[in-house]
Image (cartoon, helix red, strand yellow):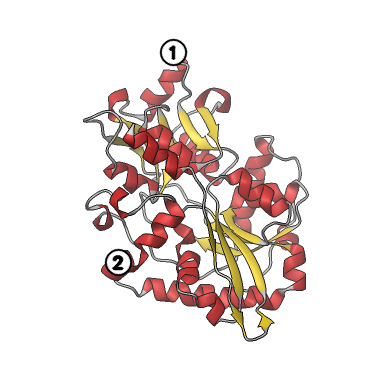
Amino acid sequence: MIQARRFVFLSLAVLIFVSVVVGAAPLPKLRVSLPPVMGSLPIAFANEWNMFAQGGLDVDVIGLSDNQTRILALMAGDIDGMICDVSTAILLITSGTDVVITSTAYQPTQTGSLALLTQSYFHINSIGDLLKRTARGSTLKSIAIIQMSDIEYEIDSLLTSLGYTVDPDKDYSYWHDMLQLSMFLNLGSVYAAVLPEPYITYLGKYPPIKPGSKLVHLSDFAGIDLLPSVIVFRRDVVEKSPDAIAKFYDVYREAINRVNHMSREELTTTGINIALSLFFPGLGKDAVPKGILNDFAVPHFSYPEMLSKQKFEDVVAWENKNGYTWKHPVYEDVTTDQFIK
């Protein structure tokens, strides 16, 4: 029950606000939402270090773990921009939300950035074993994933590359909240799930609900070209406040450079509170499994760049094939390089 209560805390999204006024004149303001994924770290660090205010910008950094909540907030105009995956950006565009993809945010390059995981007590030793569970009429779906996301696109790509015919109705169960999904995987309420870092390392160290169980990696997506996360802003914000977004990117690049040059010890020492508030809100340092900080692979963050047209077109084609949208947005109309240096 203690573990269950702790994981309940993980599903609670938190808001991180920084409001700074210099003199009598308010600073230009942006409201940016971050998902609890590795690619959000540079912006979260910049927020913690007060770099946006020092750069002449007032930024509200809002952490939300539920994809639907973040999407609805952007559609309603409650936030100006966010980090999201390519699939989400395209679905926003095709559903009538006028957003612009202003850059990439994070490109996972190392094998193991994404994994298909199960618990050892299910005695599933391969993807074939996993898919057979559904074929035998199990009440549980085979693979739990975030719906209409890059994760779904990538697991589709993996299964297809291995010769499997994907049947979403039988093979997938769909979720909106990655924190909740990780909780259910730990509790054994799903056979398997596809998760990125930092969830892979965290769950590998976190005591499982069933003593003696351990996470089994059915795939680390070797050979699959993982998509980058992207930054999107509402078009009206891009048009009305381009200087504010330019300042945001100046600080973002500075934070990336600073993070990339920090030692592991410095990162973990100064960043543990940031990571907890962003990835595992509601928990203190005592909830961090012993030794986990030495196990995390410290990523290298690339400077923001344009989302490639080929990846954009590939995801649009996949979404059309799956019936998630029937529209085909024009790449040049929904992307911009004006904030890329």
In the foreground, 262 or 219: 262
In the foreground, 307 or 67: 67
The location of residue 63, given as percent across then percent down, is 53, 55
In the foreground, 315 or 173: 173
From this view, report whether residue 203 is shown above or below residue 261.
above
Q: In the picture, residue 53 is in which quadrant? A: bottom right
- The quadrant of the rendering that contains the C terminus is bottom right
Amino acid type at image mark 2: Thr
Disc sitting over residue 136 in the figure: 1
- The quadrant of the rendering that contains the N terminus is top left
The location of residue 302, given as percent across then percent down, is 46, 68
Q: Distance between the residues labelled 1 and 2?
A: 49 Å
Q: Residue furthest top?
A: 137
Q: Residue at x 63, y 41 (%)?
A: 318
Residue 337 in view of the camera: no
From this view, report whether residue 29 is shown above or below residue 296.
below
Secondary structure beneath label 1: loop
In the foreground, 35 or 336: 35
Drawn side of residue 330 relative to residue 255, left or right: right
Q: Nearer the viewer, mark 1 or mark 2?
A: 2
Residue 278 in view of the camera: yes
The location of residue 173, given as percent across then percent down, is 52, 29
Query: On the image, numbered disc 2 is attached to which residue?
Result: 269
Tag 1–tag 2 contact (CB < 8 Å): no
Amino acid type at image mark 1: Arg
Drawn side of residue 252 relative to residue 123, left or right: right
The location of residue 278, given as percent across then percent down, is 46, 56
Q: Which of marks 1 and 2 is nearer the N terminus?
A: 1
Q: Residue furthest front?
A: 24
Q: In the picture, residue 266 is in which quadrant? A: bottom left
